[in-house]
Amino acid sequence: MKRSDLLKLLTVTTLAFLYIGVRPAHGGGEDPLVPRVPEEKLASAKLMKNPVVADAKSIAAGREIYYGKGLCVNCHGESGKGDGPGGASFDPGPRNFTNTAWQAVRTDGELFTAITDGTQYGMIAFGDNLTAKEKWEVINFIRTFGAGAVAKNTSAKSEQK
Ligand code: HEC
């Protein structure tokens, strides 16, 4: 898919949510600490290792995606707090990446799966619109909002430290 198509898709999806005011059914699921990857995929998601080392280069590439073609900033906000303008109608809102408790319970593989498949509460499924490498890079960048909090045994970077 071309970048312009991705942009359109995201704009349409965002507008649809704003317009219809979709409120997903509530359950205990609003707690951001509750896993978003469905039960049947969770174990394998947790086993996935981030193959992209979180060095300055991959973090910079991830930053480009976050503020650029990924449009993550629209919903997750300038400083990762989940307060972007496109995220206002979601309940629960877009994830606040500065929540260190959340950073500490999620593995990179879970984030990768959520970015690929989306979540039941409205995180967009990026599918193949980002390459695997781009997803790992943007995950490395998202981790920088967490001030070093990261689930153990999750990524190349945690082995590096
Ligand atoms: C249209 C708004 C929107 C955009 C654009 C968006 N997100 Fe999200 N995102 C959400 C919402 C809403 C949630 C919370 C959903 C939930 O609680 O299940 C979320 C949740 C997440 C989560 C948390 C999953 C978890 O396990 O807790 C991650 C990681 C994430 N987004 C990454 C990204 C990345 C990376 C991008 C850009 C490539 C992006 N998002 C773009 C709305 C968005």
Image (cartoon, helix red, strand yellow):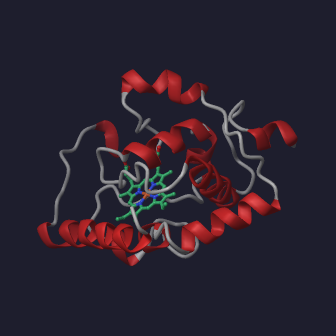
In this view, 117 is above or below 63:
above
Kindly give the residue lying farthest to the right in the view shown: 161
The number of callouts visible is 0
Quadrant assignment for ligand 1: bottom left
* Image quarter of the N terminus: bottom left
Residue 75, x across and y down, in percent: 41, 69
Give the residue displayed 56% in from the left and 47% down from the top: 132
Kindly give the residue lying farthest to the front in the view shown: 2
* Image quarter of the C terminus: top right
Residue situated in front as seen by the camera: 90 or 6:
6
Residue 28, x across and y down, in percent: 31, 37
Residue 47, x across and y down, in percent: 60, 25
On screen, residue 90 versus residue 78, left or right, reads left
Residue situated in front as seen by the camera: 77 or 108:
108
Residue 95, x across and y down, in percent: 46, 56
In this view, 52 is above or below 7:
above
Q: Quadrant of residue 86?
A: bottom left
